[in-house]
Amino acid sequence: MILPIVAYGDPILKKEAVEIDQDYPELNKLIEDMFETMYEASGVGLAAPQINRSIRLFVVDGSPFAETDDEDEEEDPKAIGMEGFKRVFINPIIEEETGEAWGFHEGCLSIPKIREEVYRKEKIRMTYYDENWQFHDEWFDGYKARIIQHEYDHIEGVLFTDHLSVLKRRLLTKRLQNISQGLISVAYKMKFPSFKKGK
């Protein structure tokens, strides 16, 4: 089932999410719905707060980063291993972040049509549970680390715009307000905070 993606301005996106256990109701169905929602919106990651669940869960599929239209084009070293990089992260913790910070123009399904350069460390070590409740302790780098760091921010109540300078955020104020008020056309289902009943 395709779920509406919560738009910028909804308080749930600024809230630190809570851990879950194996008894969380219909978890497998939720994970399935999150992947379906993410694919429908052409995303590479989706965190539970973005579908109005304040829990420490996100899904990723980095395959689009592995695709290239030009066979002669040299492979981006940061994209190595992205083909088939599909994961579920439950109760994740970033244990370490190392390496040089590098910039990349990030976007977000909750903040459509805005992309800005965000600097993040190139390598991370993360502990997490997968959908089968198997525990993992792994290192990720390149685009894998980038996607994970972005989604991890969501469960911490942080948006990519929070990493921007005060000046850059000020310049985006009107566009962000338009998103929160639903004054934007998007090709996927969204839930806008200004349209909540009783608000």
Image (tube, rainbow, N blue to C red):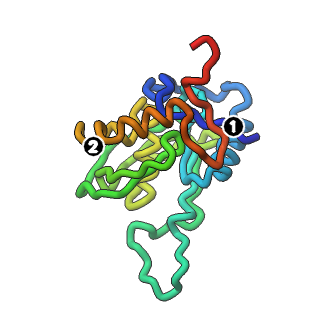
**Viewer-side residue, 88 vs 191:** 191
Q: Residue at x 27, y 52 (%)?
A: 98
Q: Quadrant of the C terminus?
A: top right
Image quarter for residue 150?
top left
Picture coordinates of residue 39 (x, y %)? 65, 52
User: Furthest-top residue in view?
Assistant: 198
Label 1 element class = loop
Q: Is residue 118 visible?
A: yes
The residue at the point 38 percent across, 59 percent down is: 141
| Residue on which disc 1 sits | 3
Q: Given the image, on which type of amino acid does mark 1 rest? A: Leu
Residue 138 seen: no
Residue type, numbered disc 2: Lys
User: Residue at coordinates 72% horizontally, 41% vertically from top-left?
Assistant: 2
Q: Residue at x 56, y 64 (%)?
A: 64
Is residue 53 or residue 24 the one in the foreground? 53
Image coordinates for residue 36, horizontal then vertical, percent: 70, 47
112, 93: nearer the viewer: 112
Give the mark, 2 or 1, whose residue is nearer the N terminus.
1
Residue at label 2? 168
Whether pointer 2 and pointer 1 mark residues with C-beta atoms closer than 8 Å, the reply is no
Q: Residues within 10 Å of mark 2 (few under 14, many from 20)?
A: few
User: In what element is the residue under mark 2?
Assistant: helix
Residue 35 as seen in the image, left or right of residue 17: right
| Left or right: residue 132 compared with residue 157 | right
Q: CA distance from mark 2 to mark 1?
A: 31 Å
Indicate the position of residue 78 as horizontal and vertical percent values.
39, 67
